[in-house]
Image (cartoon, helix red, strand yellow):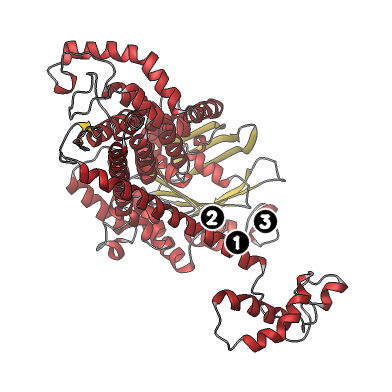
Amino acid sequence: MAKRIEAMNVTAYYGSFKAIEDINLTVEPKTVTALIGPSGCGKSTFLRSINRMHEVLPGARVNGRLTIDDEDIYDRDVDVTAVRRMIGMVFQRPNPFPTMSIFDNVVAGLRLNGVRRKSVLEEAAERALKSANLWDEVKDRLGKPGAGLSGGQQQRLCIARTIAVEPQVVLMDEPCSALDPISTLAIEDLMFKLKDRYTIIIVTHNMQQAARVSDRTAFFSIERTGDPGRLIEYDDTQKIFSNPSVKKTEDYITGRFG
Amino acid sequence: MGDTPDGSANAGTGGPGVTTSHARVAGAALSVDVPGTPAHRAPNGAGGRGGDSGTGHGPGGGGALPRRRAFGADRVFQGLTMAAGTMVLVIIVAIAIFLIAKAVPALNANTANFFTFEGWFPNESSPRFGIGALAFGTLLTSILALLLAVPVALGIALYLSHYAPRRIGTALGFLIDLLAAVPSVVFGLWGRDFFYGPVRDLSVWLNKYFSWIPIFGGDGPFGKSILLGSLVLAIMVLPIITSLSREVFRQTPTANEEAALALGATKWEMIRTAVLPYGRPGVIGATMLGLGRALGETIALAMTLGIVSNISFNIIENGGNTVAANIANAFGEANDVGRGALIASGLVLFSITLIVNITARAIIYRRREFTESAA
């Protein structure tokens, strides 16, 4: 169910602006990897280049090599929609489809893949919602609009929607930044649970969160505004937060800059 | 208020009118108990308040709080806006009274059934006229026009909002807005003198091969038909539906579009999953605005239709008439009863538009739970 992600010399641009440069890192299956760093250091850009969402923006492009179990994601012959189905994404702000019910939101991805059988959809929706720790809260109102849920529930709904298509890798772009502490805790619990089945990469501004949920941590930074973001250090979370080998990482995690 | 030394002496009231207000204070106090007409009391009250504020000590200073001014610019503005709002009501009532007063005598003089009779002969000594054929023609041309225009408009709108490169999109959008600026009489002339040709040829072709379908049947002559009128109408309502739809499509939250793409949707699937559902109420609204325009369109249809008052689904034979076109064509030689009859038909047209609008709102309202939370 889970696959390895490998980045080799990944450089991403917005038009002529180079957002990240020469990122090299490997994410092992069934682990949680946290990407941390100051604002504008390119961690979200890197995350979005993993499922080719980066290129959705006009003028954006990626150089270098990104593989999922040794298959090049950016190969000319690869179907981009297949990449995105394999590598799901949860966004910073909960974004359920406003016109859809809770049920329709969860099965939206399956419907896009041509699944029409009601029984299959219902089964998948229940499984995904249970995995997202949301089933008990919404099982009596699956026909109600997804946008009527609380922020934390909406985010878990989005996670359910993402894992309903059974991806290999789940990318999370600051999934808790718009949520209160209790909802955040619910999502963090969920990440522990999902780790058994998926490779998870999470961007977060919250260093306690990175320390709590991740096995490995990658620290990104920039020299100054306008420079491309670089990977400064990538190691076990334990090591990054107790005994980082680069001075800049230590400065950041102790709050001396950023 | 009261910035200058001069003004601060009269704190809060400033201006030459102040002295007169002060002079009236005593009188106001005396007359308060006297129940006068509202018109009388207002200036007195104002004077009293103006006088009170005169005891203040400048802006933000000590002393008692200045009284509210009864005739501040705020009050004046409130009054003006309320008058403007009330005017709408007055105008509508006046129009309604006029229409009904003119229509009723004509309806009483009618010797045929107004709702079922298909002809329109209100100027004869025993007037006979019915709205059936006209209302039917109005609805048929309008609905046909929408059937032709809406798919094209949605296509253009989606192209402009999601596919076209920015420069082409801007240029094309401008052209479409330009189309909306063409006066309807120009459309009428164009339809009658130029577009008539190709439509007649198309009608002949349709009749030759598809006459087994009732709407393409008949023996001719062809051309000045419901089809020509509807096509011209379709071109006329195209811009408004296009530009409104383009706007709502553009407003689709990026977050929703990205959510669909991240689930592995192609661009078209993304549009189906995120853009179209989000824009649906807006598209319905735009369509209804287009329908409103089509129902009321007068001169272009008066020039392109065959002006025959009968109920027929044949859309290619010369014929067809609508309420508005009939008013334009028949008003010139109408006598008293004739004008009343036309006004009665205008009332019917008004009711049709009203029903269409209410239906549209009901459709939008039904999905309110979903669309409101989208905001």
Q: Earlier in the sequence, mark 3 or mark 1?
A: 1
> Which structural element holds mark 3?
loop
Is residue B11 rendered to the left or right of residue B93?
A: right
Image coordinates of residue A188 in percent, x first then y, are 44, 61
Q: How far apart are marks 2 and 1 (CA)?
A: 18 Å
Kind of residue indicated by mark 2: Thr
- Which residue carries the number 3 mark? A258
Name the disc covering residue A213, or none. none
> Which structural element holds mark 2?
loop
Image coordinates of residue B103 in percent, x first then y, are 29, 45
- Which residue carries the number 1 mark? A242
Q: How crowded is mark 1: few (under 14 residues within 10 Å), some or many (20 or more)?
A: few
Q: Residues within 10 Å of mark 2 (few under 14, many from 20)?
A: many
The answer to whether marks 2 and 1 sit on the same chain is: yes
Image coordinates of residue B166 in percent, x first then y, are 55, 29
In-front residue for pair B125/B23? B125
Q: How crowded is mark 3: few (under 14 residues within 10 Å), some or many (20 or more)?
A: few
- Residue that appears at 44% across and 53% down: B91
Tell me if residue A118 can be seen. Answer: yes
In-front residue for pair B175/B139? B139
Name the disc covering residue A204, or none. 2
Q: Distance between the residues labelled 3 and 2?
A: 13 Å
- Residue that appears at 38% across and 56% down: A147
The vertical placement of B94 against B47, above or below, is above
